[in-house]
Structure formats: C-alpha cells, structure tokens
Image: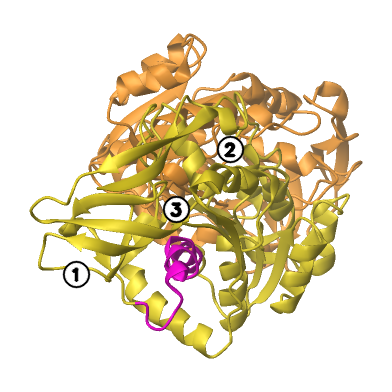
Chain colours: A yellow, B orange
Amino acid sequence: MTQSREVRLKDRPVGLPSDRNFEIVTVTLSAPGPGEVQVKNTWMTVDPYMRGRMYAGPSYSAPFNVGEAMTGGAVGEVIASNDPALKPGDLVRSFMGWREAFNAPANQLEKLDTMGLAPQLFLGAAGMPGLTAWAGLMRVAAFKPGDTVFVSGAAGAVGSMVAQIAKLKGGKVIGSAGGADKIAYLNSIGVDAAIDYKAAPDLTKALLAAAPEGIDVYFDNVGGGHLEAALNAAKPHARFAICGGISAYNNIGATPGPSNFLLIVGKRIRMEGFIVSDHGDMAKDYVPQLAAWVKEGKVDVRETVAQGIENAVDAFLKLFSGGNLGKMLVRL
Amino acid sequence: MTQSREVRLKDRPVGLPSDRNFEIVTVTLSAPGPGEVQVKNTWMTVDPYMRGRMYAGPSYSAPFNVGEAMTGGAVGEVIASNDPALKPGDLVRSFMGWREAFNAPANQLEKLDTMGLAPQLFLGAAGMPGLTAWAGLMRVAAFKPGDTVFVSGAAGAVGSMVAQIAKLKGGKVIGSAGGADKIAYLNSIGVDAAIDYKAAPDLTKALLAAAPEGIDVYFDNVGGGHLEAALNAAKPHARFAICGGISAYNNIGATPGPSNFLLIVGKRIRMEGFIVSDHGDMAKDYVPQLAAWVKEGKVDVRETVAQGIENAVDAFLKLFSGGNLGKMLVRL
C-alpha cells in the first residue's frame, strides 16, 4: 500500500493566501482497480491561475473544494498498472498535481512523448505556459514579423516564452520584470529592452524610451500599471492579448480598471482575453517547434525548483512576490 | 457681402463645458475666389466626440484652436459659385459647421445625393452617426443573426441606429437610456428590452433579467457602469465594440476603468475601439440600405432640433445631460 501526501485547501483565502489556508494530509492508496494505474508524481506545477480556483465563485476553471486536495498539472511515473495501455515505468502527464501519488483510470492520463526534452518542461515551456505564450502571441495578438512587442512578467513561465518566441519570429521585444537577476536574464535572451518595473519611476516613460514609436502588441500577464503604460504607448491598431493580471489576483474587493481605458477608442486598440484551453489545437505545431528550438540552443528555459510537497505551498505563494525566475516547479 | 455668425472656442473647458467657454462672432465673407463657392449652412450637427477636440492634447481628431471657429459636419446650399463643379442651389455636405455661411474650395465639398431623404439625415442616420452604428455593429462586433446585443445610449444618434439595425438583421436587442420618453421610443422601435438606467438600481441585474443567458455583443457609447454591467453579463467570447464613453468625457483627471476588467480573460472577451473614419468604405453599402429602410418605414429616425446658431452651444451641452432623443441637430 502506497502512502501519499497531498495538499488540501483548508479554507478560502481572503487577499494574499498564506500557509494557514492549506494543510498537508497523508493518505493511503489502495492498489489500482481494473482499468486504473498508480502514478508517482515526479514534478508538479504551481501557477498563478490557481489563485482564481481558490475563490468560491465561478472562474474559468472549477473552484477547488475546501477540505479536498487541490489539482493541477503534474508529470509522473506509472508504478503499478491494471490496464494494458500503460505499464510501470511509463511517463505520464496528468492534472493530478498537489499530491505525491494517485490512482487514476489509464485513459485519463497522457503518455508523454518527451521528444528528448526534460519531462518537467511539459509543465512549462513545452506545456500549458509555453502554449499560452504561443497562442496568445501568434493567434490572439496576431503577431507579425517586425512588430514591437511589450510583454509584462517577461521573466516568468509564460512571459519568458513570449519574449523568446517573438524574438525568434522577427519581432522587437521589450520585457518588464522586477529585480536585477530577472533583468540580467532578459538581456541574456536577447530582448531589445528590459524594464525593471520596481526601479522605473514611470513605466510609460520607460516603455516609450524603449519604443519611441510605440508598441504593436502587448502581452499582458500583470495588469494594473503595466496595462495603463501599454495603453499609453500603444500605436494605432495595437493588439493586446490579455492573459492575466497577477497584480490584482489577491485584491480584496473591486480593482480599478485602467484609468486610461478610453484610449482604446482613439487608438482603435483590440484587447482580447484568452485561455489556453481554447487553443489546444496549436500544440501539435508548437511543441515540436519548441523541442527543435531547445535542441538548437535557441531557447533558454529557466526553472525555479522547490523540493518536496511540503514546499509546494511556499512555491505557490512566491509567485505573487516575484520569487520565481522562469517556471516555478516542485520536484517530488 | 454676406454676414455669418460663427461659434468660436473662447477657452478650453475644464470639466463640463459651459456657455462661457464659447463666443459667437459675426464675420463678413468676401465673394468666393476662383475655384471657390459660398455656402449657406442649413443644418449643423453637434456630437459628443467634439468634447475631445476641446482638449489641447492629441485626440483622434485635431484639437480645436482657441479663438477660432469650431468645425464639424454641416449641410448647406451653395449661394454663389466661382467654380463650374457646383452651382447656386446645389446641396452640399461639409465639415464647416458651427457657422452660418462660409467660402470654401468646391473640391472640398461633397455634393449631396439625398436619395430622397431629408438633407439633415446626412448628419445623422445617413451620415457619420449612422455609419458608426453600422460599422461598429457589423464589422467591429461581427454581429451575427441571433446575437443578443446590448447597446448603451440606445436612444441617441448612434445607439438608436445600432438598435434598429440589429433588430432588422435578426438580433435580440437590449437598449439602455435615461427617462420615460426615451424608453417609450425604444419600445416603439421594437427593442426586446429597454432599461431606464436612471431608474435601475443595479444595471447588471437589469441586464441579466433582460438577457438571462447573457449578451453576445455590447455596443458601448457610455462607458462607466454600463461597461461593467456588460462585462458582468457577457457570454464567453462576447465581442464589445467600444465607440465612446460619454459618461467620462467631462471628467477631470483620470477615470477608473471597469473594476471587473479581468472578466475579459475568463470570458475570452474581445473589446475593440473604433473610429468611423476608418470605415468609410462601408458607406456605399450602408447609405442606400438605410435609404431603403427609411422609405419602407422600417427605421424610425428621431431628431432633437435646436433653432439658430445662437442655440448651438446649448444643444451641444445638452448631449451631456441626456437632453436629446435621437440625433441632436441645429437648424440654421
């Protein structure tokens, strides 16, 4: 019988979550039933969107239930199988993160073809965040070579892929991030300008200094002052892919929208929100392309890794204080 | 020699404009020079977008100059001609409003083919406001038959055309306006629901009561609480055509954007600002269609008419207190 620790939502956070909103519980797994396999997770992901699932109200994914283990992306190894489709040793991707091991029907798991990539990349650059970057940039924002692209949260899991894809596709890229390490990383991946928003007294000025003629595309991961600066610096007919607004995820009560929203009219800006799950059809083109870029050394994928399920909550919380360079992952 | 009164911008309004920001001056026109004609305006238009031109900063049309006559759409009659292209008695449309008469090069004027419509309609339903409605609904919002459309300012020059076009094209229409007369008008043109926003304690509730399954399209003339209600009531993948935000045009300082802006992500909403001048190519389809609808009695065009240039400023100011049903016009 396998023991597994899992992270449960103890109560719904109000404002910034803390350790006290979660608890770790050890459960015992029975042997997998007919059609089932048992999986030992080796990697799980923590992502900003999970904050939305901690609210009771409707979000774009179902809310977590209080008192139950949370869910999320994970990569693991089959350790016992009661189904011919999977055998012990097989690598699988699932939505059964936030736990060390689990039983599940084999047909609900994805047997992973890593294409020679490290497995955990399928939770990051080759997974949901990478596809988010690709779909948001190429489809939602309709990126064209020569576009000037501003991406906020540019040193994060999604933003760092937006920046690198836009460079590889012939764009000019301005990335914002907080702190010297992230700015150094952005410069190392070849962005045309990196803005340390924690050090910039006026984000609009900094953006216009980097892009005096304005921006064609804004990829928004942050919201708030970043979105206002992007509106101020937008060229006519600019396209904004609104991916998220981490600056507001923990706000209590209403968050004022951009105070210069009406620039959308005079500049004829198109803003479009999107969710990666609508764009799964693009994975078949994107993932092999990403694998090729990684092999050719054209993409520099960074990870910030926490060790052990006991540190998963802390890793999640660090997303909201900028404590990750690249993809935040938990190795189990 | 012709005498003409014209309305000049005396100084730039701060907040809500008043009479004191304008002055009426009488000028004397010389005879038209070579290639010129002299026109006596019979109708001029006042429109909300003109408020933006009273600011010094860049807007989407050039700012008015202090001390000079303002400009805007007008319809008039040629009273003297020094160019073979136009002869006395010809009806012309120009951008030389806010004055009783003017000289201008004949090649800068549009000789008007009224298609049997009243001339002043070419400042309203068959002019810029009507084309704004058509382009915003059909192109920007990509209206499809069966869509549920919410339009704010629905009894105004643009909104009333949005409502009627959407109904004629097979949509369900919810319109908002302020006051019993406007609501009666909206009901008379066959909207599916009319919301008196001045009487509705909760706009989101009122909108969801009218459209329990949500809205597909929002045509925004108002901004503020209307935009927030539309975000709350939007179906997934709703399209918002952002035409204007009259609720904020006279604000001093920054105007908070919609406090529920982040719904754009979860609902994958597309918001697009637009200006009618980008869509002039659509006039060749729209204007004959509108003329046919008017002749068939399928469109009910309303006007609120002020008399004389001395009342033009007052007519303009009334736009911001909801003092117009349909198109606000000045008969000269």
Q: Is residue A117 magenta?
A: yes
| Residue B85 sits in quarter | bottom right
Sequence-first disc among 1 and 2: 1
Name the subunit of mark 2: A
Return the residue at label 1.
A87
User: Considering the numbered disc 2 on the image, is that residue within a helix, a strand or a loop?
Assistant: loop
Q: Main secondary structure of the magenta part?
A: helix
Looking at the image, is mark 3 or mark 2 nearer the viewer? 2
Residue plotted at (11% across, 50% down): A33
What segment is highlighted magenta in the picture? A114-136
Q: Amino acid at mark 2?
A: Tyr
Name the subunit of mark 3: A
Q: CA distance from mark 3 to mark 1?
A: 37 Å
Residue plotted at (47% across, 27% down): B229
Horizontally, residue A181 falls left or right of residue B74, namely right
Return the residue at label 2.
A249
Labelled disc at residue A134? none
Q: CA distance from mark 1 to mark 2?
A: 41 Å
Q: A216 above or below B71?
A: below
Horizontally, residue A263 falls left or right of residue B7, namely left
Residue plotted at (43% across, 37% down): A53
Return the residue at label 3.
A274
Q: Position of residue B326 (x, y in %)?
A: 49, 28
Neighbour tally class for label 1: few under 14, some 14-19, many 20 plus, Cα within 10 Å: some
Looking at the image, is mark 3 or mark 1 nearer the viewer? 1
Q: A162 above or below B145?
A: below
